Structures are given as C-alpha cells and as structure tokens.
Image (tube, grey):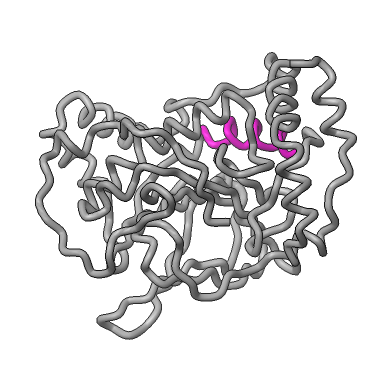
Amino acid sequence: MSTNQLHQARNLTLPSREAMLYRVPSVQQFWTHNYDLLSDAWKEWEESQNDSLAPLGSALLDSRLREAVTQAWADPSKESVVLELMHEVAPDVFEFQFFDPQRLADLRAYLEQAWDAQIPLRPPYGIVLNRRGAMLDSRSEGYLAAPSFQAFYREILNTYMRPIARLLFPEIMGYDTQTFGFSIHYKPKTDTSIRPHTDASAVTLNININLPDEPFTGSTVDFYDPSAGKMIPLAFTSGSAMIHRGNVVHAAQPITSGERTNLVLWLFGDNGRMPIQDTQRSDVDAKLRWTMPTGKLDNFAPF
C-alpha cells in the first residue's frame, strides 16, 4: 500500500449532492473506481491516528447485555438471561439497552475523528446526505473501512445481533447470513424524518448513539400495530436499541430540536433473500442459535 493513499483520497472531487440524490451513473462510477483507494486511505488514516483514537470493543456495551451474551455463548441453555433483557414494545419490536451511556463518548470520539478525516464517505442513498450519514459494511462502496471500526462492527453483528435476532425471531435462521449497515443523523431543517416503509432485511437493529447530554425532541420511530390498526410511537434514549423484523412498517417522525444519530444494521440471506411473509415460528435448538455462519459474505447490497 502506498503511503500517499490518504493524501490522494482527500483530494478526490466528490460528486455533487444533486448527483447523489438523483443517483446519476457517474456517482456509482466514482465510488466503484475509488473503492480500493478509499479502503487503503482508511487504513493509513487509522495508523496515523492510532495514539489518539479511543479503543473500540465490547467494553462499550451495557454490562448486563455483555455478561448475558457471554454466558449464552458459553452455554446456550442459559440464553434466557438474554431474553430477560428484551422488552416487546410493539408487535415484533423489542427494545433493550445496547451501549453503556457512560462509555458512548469513546465510540463517538472515534466516529467524530473519522467524520473529520476528510476521506469521502458514501451516504445512504435516499436517507441522509449529511456529515454523519455513512455506509458501514464492506459490501458498500465508500464505506467506513477503518480496520478497528470494522472489527467492532463485525463483533456487534456476529456476537450480539445475529443470536439475539434468532432468539426473538427463529424463523429468520438461514436468512441472516449477510450483513448491511449505515449511520443516520437527524437534525431540524436538514434530514428530519423518514416516511412509512419496510426494510429490505430479515431483521433490523437500530441503535442510538447520542450521548446522555444530547437530548432531542420529536424523532420518534413509529411502528405499525396491525391488530390495533395504528402506529405506536417509540423514543430512543442514549445507547438504547430497537430490534425488529424488517417487514414491520415503521416511520421516523420529524425531529423538532436537538440532533439524533443512530447506527442501523441489517441481516438478510444470500443475495438478499428474506423469509416468506407470515412464516410460522418453530422451536430451534439453542445450540444452533449461538453459532457463526460458515458461508462467505456475498456482494449484494440493497442500496
């Protein structure tokens, strides 16, 4: 790897905001052409910042969650300790504490430095095009390829998200081999809301990374309850997460003050496959839940 990859990446001319919004062909060509350059630039950046970057790892997670998941990996028959931390707040929607709010400053400090690195990051098309909206998965061009972040991202997906998703929604097993992720950021007068939609995922994990002293108003995530025929508004708190089936209709309401930043992670099957609608849930051996997929990651990306 050339030692001037970082300099080259910082001197790239980004496609215009308008071009990205309308997804003109030259935008995809830009990210595809510069995939390797940008990946190498992130490695070079992290090496140059190594002494100032906060370490990322499971110590940033809520201690009860970390201990329960560690216990379940060691002995899957004790997975009920994980289930006890999950609170169903709408049909097929569970809320729980993911990050320790007092440790979120370390993750945010790392991300703030990454967002300020002047290395082009591709925003999630059609969701947010501001500074903190970025692709996180290696299947996406222009992703946040810094090695220590990628190791942390993989730990969240493989050690925590997938077995928890299988515990709550056993019908997604076999449709959880592939991963996808992005960050989103809401603030008044810019990207403020998302209209009702479903996700192209078997399961979605949505994690708030606001610090405890970063309050906001509005910006509830509303989930549709088909039995009641109405939307149920839910609010994030610092470090909290919501995990839900991708086919649950939901919307983000306008933020009215403050800012909200979240990480959004998806699981789906090979080449984007998802469970058939209304697949019945059946009992699954706990030992099968607490395993890692053995197949390779493919290149399918929903957007």
Tell me which residue sits at (25%, 33%) in the image. Answer: 68
Estimate the x, y position of residue 282 in percent, counting from the top left: 11, 55
Q: Is residue 120 magenta?
A: no
Considering the image in quadrants, where does the N terminus appear?
top right
- Write the start and end of the magenta stretch as one range: 103-116
Estimate the x, y position of residue 78 in percent, counting from the top left: 13, 34
On screen, residue 260 versus residue 63, left or right, reads right
Of residue 123 and residue 257, the one placed in the foreground of this image is 123
Res 63 → quadrant: top left
Of residue 37 and residue 103, the one placed in the foreground of this image is 37
Res 277 → quadrant: bottom left
Tell me which residue sits at (73%, 20%) in the image. Answer: 44
Of residue 4 and residue 55, the one placed in the foreground of this image is 4
Res 127 → quadrant: bottom right
Mostly what secondary structure, the magenta segment? helix
Tell me which residue sits at (39%, 51%) in the image. Answer: 268
Considering the image in quadrants, where does the C terminus appear?
bottom right
Estimate the x, y position of residue 212 in percent, counting from the top left: 55, 46
On screen, residue 297 versus residue 161, left or right, reads right
* Count of all numbered marks drawn on residues in the image: 0
Estimate the x, y position of residue 209 in percent, counting from the top left: 55, 45
On screen, residue 27 versus residue 182, left or right, reads right
Tell me which residue sits at (41%, 33%) in the image. Answer: 296
Relative to 287, say whether 253 is above or below: below
